[in-house]
Amino acid sequence: GAVVSQHPSWVICKSGTSVKIECRSLDFQATTMFWYRQFPKQSLMLMATSNEGSKATYEQGVEKDKFLINHASLTLSTLTVTSAHPEDSSFYICSANSGSGADTQYFGPGTRLTVL
Amino acid sequence: QQPVQSPQAVILREGEDAVINCSSSKALYSVHWYRQKHGEAPVFLMILLKGGEQKGHEKISASFNEKKQQSSLYLTASQLSYSGTYFCVAGSSNTGKLIFGQGTTLQVKP
């Protein structure tokens, strides 16, 4: 099946710093990738849709200036959490559609962000 | 709109069966089922696209009712490895977005 990777798998940073998370589709091209956030014991919440070569589309309530998304190529999307604060600590997961025509999305392994 | 799942949690003994229900206030384009283990990303189980469709593999199957507003996931003869949180996910036809239900936590005990 399609493989999606994320890097780093976990990161600890100080409050006020910025953190970049990478999402890569390893064996297929993804014109669209999605970013989710999951707080402990909660469901995944869609943050934004990342479109290759164009601006990301953010869900209601998600600050686009705080969560910068860049989809520079068909296999890479990045999420940058700017000026991170403890309340941004969460599990960030990306996904990509394999393009196999079955609408199946494959998820990356996730990145655990802890802001001190 | 977020799909609504029931029950919120289930505890089973190995070998027992379980059903997880999912409902939506309006017709869905597609229903996806995922399972997530603690600390890991969700793993795709199956997708249903057509009203009346039933699909499954091994001892895990799902149905999508004719009106496409309800889906159920069936777990038979449960194994310890079935433990995790199951998500019913609504798919969008034109955007590819997935909207996750709140999840159902399943615990299978020996």
Image (cartoon, rainbow, N blue to C red):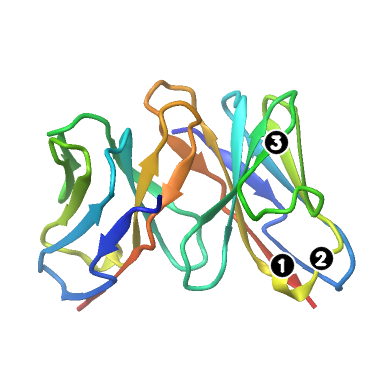
The residue pinned by badge 1 equals A88
> Which is more toward the observer, B76 or A50?
A50
Above or below, A2 against B44 in this view is above
Chain of the residue on which disc 1 is drawn = A
Q: Are marks 1 and 2 in contact (CB under 8 Å)?
A: yes
Describe residue B54's horizontal placement relative to residue B27 as left or right.
left
Frontmost of labels 2 and 3 is 3
The residue pinned by badge 3 equals A56
Q: Residue B12 in the image: x percent, y percent? A: 17, 75
> Which is more toward the observer, A81 or B61?
A81
Residue kind at label 2, given as amino acid type: Ala
Residue kind at label 1, given as amino acid type: Asp
Residue kind at label 3, given as amino acid type: Ala
Q: Quadrant of residue A76?
A: top right
- Residue A41 in sight in this render: yes
The residue pinned by badge 2 equals A84
Gap in Å between the C-alphas at discs 1 and 3? 19 Å
